[in-house]
């Protein structure tokens, strides 16, 4: 077996792995990056980019549904060409993946190892039982794969996960989507707007990323008004039949239901790719999911010389977080044992449904209700939103009653991606409600809705301030 020596061994050539490799090299260390699957990040190949391509097609198709209300008339019928839709999704997806692959191939060949890595000790691993690697430090950045609950596997050849959906050559007539989270909402709504009959299922009533009961309830009502959505089903039975897949379930009201669909789409979460890494050989402590216990500020696994970043640690499975974590892990792997906390940004998550959903900073469930005020605005009567016929949404802003600092927000609404960025920048800058209200707001813009929520929070904060402060 061939043996190589390196300072830093990075396992995985996705977003986190590439960032870790570059950080280690920038620090002047020898590094190798090991990949057992195809090059191309989760984002480019099966995540952010192909899903947005499908969403863009759905938005174009859905736009005509508002024409009558705008006073526009269409003579004739607009037809969704499924093969053409999916051909563009695959073509542009492959283009994005190609950019990533080009970047990987610019890495010197001596630094790239192809194959599946497995630890054999605290400072050794083997790649496909052909190459032994002795390292000073290692970074685990192996990503994740879709998780499919056992009951859904009965769909057999009609079961689809998001990793497979973008390889479709045509759109099906009907699908059952399990999981009304980020992936399920984006894909399910897009398919519905492209003419696919969609029925969405969830457990426990959770919809989207929300923890705020009022925002979650609003989201549930909104999506359920567009396509069938049962967010709290029980006794699900999936059966492959000649006509497709039969799905039986009991609704939240105790009523037995049944449908037959062409495909079952599992959007039921992802599992870190760590089980085949031979982690037992490292002595690292693992949690119940076999994921190493790690410090989220340094990405170090216990007191070891091994770090973990990106979707593999299942902490914040988002591209920008994976890039930050990879950089922190790679930098600390290079400076080991002088490990330092890395700079983390204000948490920011966006769902590109319509309306868009977002969480910023600390979520409602992370806060003490007695220690915050909740500023609220509905977008149903917000000026610019009504002008555009996009007036659906609810925004809750959370502010500290002691000093008025904005701590977080959960929101659903038009252009929520932009409002979420403004909030994230303000939170990371330590801004108070009053300081945010001093910023410019143009008219008429959707951002005026944010101002309304901040004014609501400011009014509530005034009632919590001591008399002498209010008098001042």
Image (spheres, grey):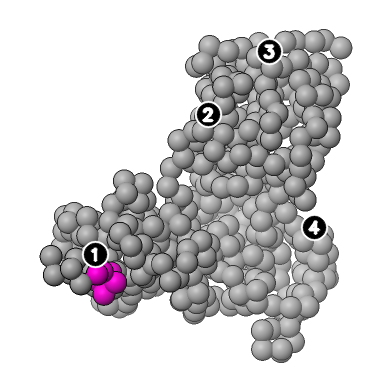
State the CA–CA distance, disc 1 to disc 4.
50 Å
State the CA–CA distance, disc 3 to disc 4.
44 Å
Looking at the rendered structure, the secondary structure element under dot 3 is strand
Q: Is the C-beta separation of discs 1 and 4 under 8 Å?
A: no
Residue 356 shown left or right of residue 99 in the figure: left
Report the mark closest to the observer, 3 or 4.
3
- Give above or below for 38 relative to 136: below
Q: Residue 469: give x, y in percent of width and height.
A: 19, 66
Q: Is the C-beta separation of discs 3 and 4 under 8 Å?
A: no
Q: Residue 82: give x, y in percent of width and height.
A: 56, 58
Looking at the rendered structure, the secondary structure element under dot 4 is helix
Dot 1, how many residues are within 10 Å of its Cα: few (below 14), some (14-19), or many (20+)?
many
Dot 3, how many residues are within 10 Å of its Cα: few (below 14), some (14-19), or many (20+)?
some
The magenta span reads 461-466
Q: Name the residue under label 4.
A: 157
Relative depth, front residue between 341 and 144: 341
Question: If you read the primary sequence from the N terminus, does the residue marked by circle 2 or circle 1 appear first?
Answer: 2
Q: Name the residue under label 2.
A: 340
Q: Residue 188: which quarter of the image? A: bottom right
Q: Mark 3 points at which residue?
A: 6
Q: Is the C-beta separation of discs 3 and 1 under 8 Å?
A: no
Relative depth, front residue between 247 and 235: 235
Question: If you read the primary sequence from the N terminus, does the residue marked by circle 3 or circle 4 appear first?
Answer: 3
- The residue drawn where x is 67% and y is 66% is 178
Dot 2, how many residues are within 10 Å of its Cα: few (below 14), some (14-19), or many (20+)?
some
- The residue drawn where x is 72% and y is 10% is 5
Q: Residue 100: give x, y in percent of width and height.
A: 54, 30
Q: Residue 462 lies in magenta, yes or no?
A: yes
Residue 20 shown left or right of residue 265 in the figure: left
């Amino acid at each position: 077996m061939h043996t190589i020596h390196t300072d830093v061994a990075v396992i995985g050539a996705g977003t986190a792995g590439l960032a870790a490799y570059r950080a280690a090299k920038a620090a002047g260390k020898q590094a190798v990056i090991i990949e057992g699957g195809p090059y191309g990040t989760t984002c480019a190949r099966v995540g952010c980019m192909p899903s947005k391509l499908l969403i863009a097609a759905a938005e174009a198709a859905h736009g005509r549904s508002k024409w009558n209300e705008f006073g526009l008339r269409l003579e004739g019928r607009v037809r969704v060409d499924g093969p053409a839709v999916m051909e563009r999704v695959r073509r542009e997806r492959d283009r994005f993946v190609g950019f990533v692959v080009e970047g990987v191939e610019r890495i010197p060949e001596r630094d790239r190892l192809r194959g599946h890595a497995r630890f054999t000790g605290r400072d050794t691993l083997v790649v496909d039982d052909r190459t032994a690697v002795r390292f000073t430090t290692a970074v685990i950045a192996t990503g994740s794969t879709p998780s499919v609950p056992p009951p859904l596997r009965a769909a057999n050849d009609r079961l689809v996960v998001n990793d497979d959906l973008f390889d479709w050559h045509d759109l099906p007539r009907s699908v059952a989507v399990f999981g009304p989270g980020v992936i399920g909402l984006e894909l399910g709504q897009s398919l519905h707007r492209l003419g696919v009959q969609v029925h969405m299922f969830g457990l426990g009533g959770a919809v989207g990323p929300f923890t705020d009961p009022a925002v979650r309830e609003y989201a549930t009502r909104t999506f359920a008004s567009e396509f069938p959505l049962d967010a709290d089903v029980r006794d699900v039975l999936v059966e492959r039949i000649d006509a497709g897949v039969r799905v039986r379930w009991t609704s939240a009201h105790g009523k037995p239901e049944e449908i037959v669909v062409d495909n079952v789409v599992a959007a039921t979460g992802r599992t870190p790719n760590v089980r085949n890494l031979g982690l037992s050989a490292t002595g690292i402590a693992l949690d119940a999911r076999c994921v190493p216990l790690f410090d989220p500020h340094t990405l170090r696994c216990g007191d070891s010389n091994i770090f973990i970043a990106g979707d593999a640690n299942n902490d914040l499975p988002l591209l920008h977080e994976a890039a930050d974590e990879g950089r922190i892990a790679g930098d600390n792997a290079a400076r080991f044992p002088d490990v330092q906390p890395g700079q983390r940004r204000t948490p920011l998550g966006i769902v590109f449904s319509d309306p868009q959903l977002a969480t910023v900073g600390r979520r409602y469930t992370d806060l003490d209700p007695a220690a915050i005020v909740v500023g609220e605005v509905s977008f149903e009567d917000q000026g610019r939103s009504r002008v555009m016929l996009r007036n659906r949404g609810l925004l809750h802003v959370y502010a500290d009653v002691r000093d008025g600092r904005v701590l977080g927000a959960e929101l659903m609404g038009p252009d929520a991606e932009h409002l979420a960025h403004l909030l994230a920048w303000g939170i990371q800058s330590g801004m108070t409600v009053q300081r945010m209200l001093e910023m410019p707001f143009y008219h008429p813009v959707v951002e005026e809705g944010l101002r309304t929520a901040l004014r609501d929070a400011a009014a509530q904060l005034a009632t919590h301030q001591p008399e002498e402060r209010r008098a001042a």
